[in-house]
Image (cartoon, coloured by chain):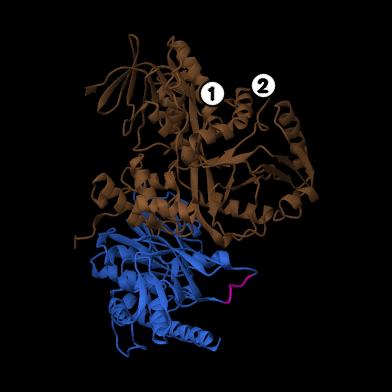
C-alpha cells in the first residue's frame, strides 16, 4: 500500500459532477485529487441521458433545483464558450393533445414565470404546427420555451475534466475508493493500491454515492435505481423536429422526449422505468413503447432510419432509517438536489435531472462550502477557465484543412467515414486521455454515424494500441473486459 | 487538375469503369480510400467469382488482382489512400490522401463507392451493449485481412450471402457457429451458398426468428432468440454476434447534390452504390456499360 501526499480535497467520482467539482475547487487555492473507479471520465450516469439543458420551468419555485437551474441556463453560453463545447439553444415545445395536457401547460407556464424563466409562451395548435410541421396534426396547444438547449454531455464532462486537469487537479483512474475513514485532520481514503489523505471529501460517486457516504456516516439516504431507454435516428432522417419536444400525453403515462442533437441526429427518449438487473441494460418493451409514442407524436419520422438504441441509469434518492446493521427504506423520496454536509464530507447523492444543466452551478455551490470548511478564502489567481477543443477537420474550410495537413499529415487520413474524422483527431483524443474505443467516441464522435463504427473500429483500436503501446487484443470498447478482439492481428497468423 | 472523369472508389465497379473509360481515350482519375485497389473483393478469399465474366471459378482476391493488372497498364491517374470528402456542384471534388488535401475538376463523375452494412443498432434489442458484436463485412475483413481472433462461439443474425460465407469461414477456422438466425421462412442468398456453406458445414439455421436481447457485461455472453410466429424465446450462449442484416448503397458523398429527388446529369452510380448485386461479375459488366455510355455521351457533345 502506497501512502500518497495529503491534498486539501479528494473528489470521489469523475462523472459530470466530479469533473466540475474538481474544476470549481481549483478556483480556490486548494489542492484537489480525483479518484475514479473506471479507466476514464464520464462512464456512469453522466454517459446516457437526454442531453437537455433545462430552463427551470419544471422545478418548484423556491427549491435549490429551480434556483440553480435558472441560473445555470442563463450562464450556459458562457460556460460552453469557455470550455470549447458546442451548445445549441434550439428551444423546446411541449405539445399536448387534450384538456388534461392543457392544464399541465398552464401549470408549467405559471411555474416558469414564477421562476423568472424568460420568453415562455403558450402557443395555439396552428402556431405549434408552423414551428414543427412534422408533429401530429392532433396537437391542441403547446408551451414554447426558447431557452431550452442541448449539449453533448460527453463533451461537457470531458471539457470540464481537461480544464480541471490543466488547472492542476490530479486525476487518478482505476482508483476505486474501497474504504474511507475519519482521521485526525480529515479523511483517509483507501483504494486497492494506495492510501490517500485529505482535509475534505466531495462525494460525487454517482450510483455509489450512498454507499461511499456510509463508509463514514450512518445510513440516512439510499439510491434506488431506475432506467431509461433511448434510440438515435440517422442524420438524414426525414419527418423529424428542430426543437426539443416534451410530449405530455393525455393519459398521464410516460411521454416522449425528442432532441435534435448537436450532431444533427434525433434522439428519442421517454420517462423512467423500473431498473434492469444491469444498470446500462436496455428494456425491449421500453424501446417498443418509444417507437409507439413516435408514431403518435411524430408520425412521419421514418423509424427504419434508427441507428442505435441504448439505456441509461437514473439515481432516485430516498430517505432511509437505520435498522439493525442495515437500513429501512421510507416512502420519502427526495425531490430537490440532495446534498449532505457532514463535517468535511460533502455528498451529492442521487443527483438527476436537471443534473447535466446544473453540474457547473452545483460544483460552485459545493466549492464555496468546501473552501469555507477548510478556511480557505483565497482564490487561485492562476486559474484559467478556457479549454481548447480538439480541432475538427470536418469544420475547416478547404484552405484551412490544407494548412493543417501540411503541418500534420495524419489530419488528412480520414478514419471515421461517416463523421469525416481524421487519424490526427483520434491521436489527439488519445493524447488527451482516451484509452478505449468509446473513450475516443465520447471525445470526438467516431463511430456515431450511420455505419455505427463497422468501418472504423478496427482502425481506431489499432491506433489506440499504437499510441498506448498495447497489443490490439488489450484494447477495449469500454474498459473492463470489453476487449474488441480476443487475439491475433497483423503479422500473427 | 482537370479530368474528363472522376471515379470514386477502386473496387470491382470503379476499376471496370476506369479501364473502359481509359480505353476510350478519356482522361481518368480514380480515388480509392484503401491502400490497395480491389475494395471488398480483397477480403473475399473464397471462390465463386468470375463464373460469368471469366468463365472460371476464382476467388475474390484473384478477381481483383486480374483487374489491378490491367488497370496499371492503362493511362489512369490512380490515387490510393485517397478519400473523396466532398463533391461540389461546380464539378470539383475534395480528395484527402497521403499527399495532403487536393481539389480536382472533372466533366463527369462515376460513383463506385460500394455499400455499407446495416448495424445492430437498426434492430431493437434489449439488454447490454457489450463488445463482440460485428457486422459480417467488418468480421470478414478483420479475420481475412488482419488475422484477428474474434471469439470461439458465434451467433450470426441474417442469412444472406455474406452471413453464410462468414459462417463457413468461421467453421474452417475451427470455430463454433451456434446458429444462423433468419427472420424469413427460408434462407437468403444464393442456392450455391446454401449448398457450399450451410449444408456442407452443417451449420444450424433458425428460421422465422430474430435476436431481441443481448447479454453480457464487457463481452457478449449470450443472445435471446425470439420466434416471430410463436413468441417463444431461447437463449443461445455465444461470445460473438455477427450481423448480416442488409446492405445499403453508400452514396454519402453525393447526397448533398441531390435536388428534388434527382442527381445532376454529370453524376452516375454503378456497382453496389447503384443497387446491391449478388454477383461481382454483374457489377463489372454494369460498370463497363455505364462508362461506355458516358464516353459516347461525351463524344457526341
Give residue B124's position: percent from left, percent from top. 51, 56
Relative side of A55 to A42, left or right: right
In magenta, the rendered stretch is B261-265
Q: Chain of mark 2?
A: A
Q: Position of residue A344 (x, y in %)?
A: 42, 14
For residue A207, which quarter of the picture?
Answer: top left
**Residue A477, numbered circle:** none
The chain displayed blue equals B
Q: Residue furthest front?
A: B1
Whole-percent x and y of residue A430?
A: 34, 44
Residue with the most extreme bottom position: B55
Quarter containing the N terminus of chain A: top left
Left or right: residue B18 versus residue A318 is left
Pick the front one: B238 or B66:
B66
What residue appears at the point 38 percent right and 56 percent down from the top-left corner?
A412
Pointer 2: what residue? A62
Mark 1 falls within which chain? A
- Tag of residue A338: 1
Task: Find chain A in the image and tell me its colour.
Answer: brown
Main SS class of the magenta portion in the image = loop
- Dots 2 and 1 on the same chain: yes
Q: Residue at x 53, y 42 (%)?
A: A86
Crowding near pointer 1: few (<14 within 10 Å), some, many (20+)? some
Amino acid at each position: 500500500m502506497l501512502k500518497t501526499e495529503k491534498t486539501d480535497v479528494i473528489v470521489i467520482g469523475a462523472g459530470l459532477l466530479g469533473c466540475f467539482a474538481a474544476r470549481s475547487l481549483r478556483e480556490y487555492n486548494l489542492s484537489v485529487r480525483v479518484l475514479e473507479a473506471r479507466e476514464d471520465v464520464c462512464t456512469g450516469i453522466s454517459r446516457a441521458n437526454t442531453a437537455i439543458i433545462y430552463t427551470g420551468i419544471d422545478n418548484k419555485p423556491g427549491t435549490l433545483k429551480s434556483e440553480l437551474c435558472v441560473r445555470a441556463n442563463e450562464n450556459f453560453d458562457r460556460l460552453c464558450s469557455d470550455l470549447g463545447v458546442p451548445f445549441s439553444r434550439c428551444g423546446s415545445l411541449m405539445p399536448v393533445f387534450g384538456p388534461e395536457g392543457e392544464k399541465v401547460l398552464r401549470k408549467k407556464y405559471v411555474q416558469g414565470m414564477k421562476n423568472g424563466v424568460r420568453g415562455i409562451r403558450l402557443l395555439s395548435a396552428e402556431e405549434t404546427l408552423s414551428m414543427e410541421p412534422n408533429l401530429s396534426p392532433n396537437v391542441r396547444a403547446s408551451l414554447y420555451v426558447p431557452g431550452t438547449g442541448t449539449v453533448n454531455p460527453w463533451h461537457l464532462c470531458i471539457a470540464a475534466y481537461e480544464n480541471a486537469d490543466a488547472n492542476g487537479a490530479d486525476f487518478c483512474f482505476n482508483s476505486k475508493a474501497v474504504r474511507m475513514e475519519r482521521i485526525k485532520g480529515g479523511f483517509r481514503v483507501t483504494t486497492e493500491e494506495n492510501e490517500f489523505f485529505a482535509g475534505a471529501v466531495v462525494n460525487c460517486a454517482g450510483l455509489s454515492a450512498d454507499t461511499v457516504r456510509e463508509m463514514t456516516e450512518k445510513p440516512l439516504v439510499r439510491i434506488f435505481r431506475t432506467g431509461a431507454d433511448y434510440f438515435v435516428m440517422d442524420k438524414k432522417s426525414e419527418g423529424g423536429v428542430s426543437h426539443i419536444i416534451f410530449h405530455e400525453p393525455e393519459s398521464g403515462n410516460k411521454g416522449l422526449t425528442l432532441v435534435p442533437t448537436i450532431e444533427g441526429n434525433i434522439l428519442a427518449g421517454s420517462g423512467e422505468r423500473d431498473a434492469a438487473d444491469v444498470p446500462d441494460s436496455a428494456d425491449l418493451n421500453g424501446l417498443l413503447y418509444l417507437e409507439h409514442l413516435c408514431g403518435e407524436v411524430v408520425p412521419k419520422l421514418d423509424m427504419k432510419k434508427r441507428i442505435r438504441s441504448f439505456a441509461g441509469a437514473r439515481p432516485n434518492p430516498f430517505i432511509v432509517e437505520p435498522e439493525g446493521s442495515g437500513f429501512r427504506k421510507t416512502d420519502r423520496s427526495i425531490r430537490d438536489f440532495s446534498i449532505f454536509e457532514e463535517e468535511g464530507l460533502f455528498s451529492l447523492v442521487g443527483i438527476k435531472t436537471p443534473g447535466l444543466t446544473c453540474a457547473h452551478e452545483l460544483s460552485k455551490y459545493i466549492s464555496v462550502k468546501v473552501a469555507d470548511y477548510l478556511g480557505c478564502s483565497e482564490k487561485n489567481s492562476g486559474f484559467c477557465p478556457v479549454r481548447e477543443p480538439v480541432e475538427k477537420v470536418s469544420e475547416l474550410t478547404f484552405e484551412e484543412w490544407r494548412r493543417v495537413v501540411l503541418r500534420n499529415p495524419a489530419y488528412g487520413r480520414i478514419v471515421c467515414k461517416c463523421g469525416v474524422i481524421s487519424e490526427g483527431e483520434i491521436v489527439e483524443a488519445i493524447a488527451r486521455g482516451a484509452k478505449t474505443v468509446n473513450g475516443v467516441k465520447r471525445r470526438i464522435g467516431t463511430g456515431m454515424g450511420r455505419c455505427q463504427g463497422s468501418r472504423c473500429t478496427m482502425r481506431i483500436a489499432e491506433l489506440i494500441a499504437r499510441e498506448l503501446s498495447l497489443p490490439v487484443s488489450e484494447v477495449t470498447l469500454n474498459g473492463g473486459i470489453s476487449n474488441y478482439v480476443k487475439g491475433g492481428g497483423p503479422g500473427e497468423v | 487538375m482537370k479530368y474528363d472523369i472522376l471515379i470514386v472508389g477502386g473496387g470491382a465497379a470503379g476499376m471496370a469503369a476506369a479501364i473502359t473509360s481509359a480505353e476510350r481515350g478519356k482522361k481518368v482519375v480514380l480515388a480509392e480510400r484503401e491502400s490497395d485497389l480491389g475494395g471488398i473483393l480483397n477480403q473475399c478469399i473464397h471462390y465463386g467469382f468470375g463464373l460469368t465474366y471469366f468463365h472460371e471459378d476464382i476467388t475474390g482476391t484473384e478477381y481483383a488482382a486480374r483487374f489491378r493488372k490491367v488497370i496499371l497498364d492503362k493511362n489512369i491517374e490512380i490515387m490510393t489512400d485517397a478519400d473523396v470528402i466532398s463533391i461540389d456542384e461546380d464539378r470539383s471534388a475534395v480528395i484527402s490522401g497521403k499527399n495532403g488535401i487536393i481539389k480536382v475538376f472533372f466533366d463527369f463523375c462515376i460513383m463506385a463507392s460500394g455499400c455499407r452494412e446495416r448495424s445492430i443498432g437498426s434492430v431493437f434489442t434489449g439488454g447490454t451493449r457489450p463488445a463482440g458484436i460485428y457486422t459480417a463485412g467488418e468480421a470478414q475483413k478483420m479475420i481475412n485481412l488482419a488475422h484477428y481472433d474474434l471469439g470461439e462461439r458465434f451467433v450470426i443474425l441474417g442469412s444472406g450471402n455474406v452471413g453464410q460465407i462468414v459462417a463457413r469461414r468461421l467453421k474452417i477456422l475451427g470455430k463454433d457457429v451456434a446458429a444462423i438466425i433468419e427472420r424469413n421462412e427460408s434462407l437468403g442468398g444464393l442456392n450455391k451458398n446454401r449448398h457450399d456453406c450451410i449444408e456442407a458445414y452443417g451449420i444450424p439455421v433458425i428460421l422465422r426468428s430474430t435476436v431481441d436481447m443481448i447479454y453480457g457485461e464487457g463481452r457478449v455472453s449470450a443472445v435471446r432468440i425470439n420466434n416471430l410466429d410463436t413468441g417463444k424465446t431461447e437463449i443461445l450462449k455465444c461470445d460473438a454476434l455477427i450481423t448480416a442484416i442488409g446492405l445499403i448503397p453508400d452514396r454519402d458523398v453525393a447526397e448533398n447534390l441531390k435536388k428534388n429527388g434527382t442527381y445532376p446529369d454529370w453524376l452516375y452510380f454503378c456497382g453496389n452504390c447503384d443497387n446491391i448485386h449478388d454477383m461481382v461479375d454483374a457489377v463489372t459488366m454494369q460498370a463497363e456499360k455505364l462508362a461506355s455510355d458516358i464516353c459516347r455521351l461525351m463524344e457526341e457533345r
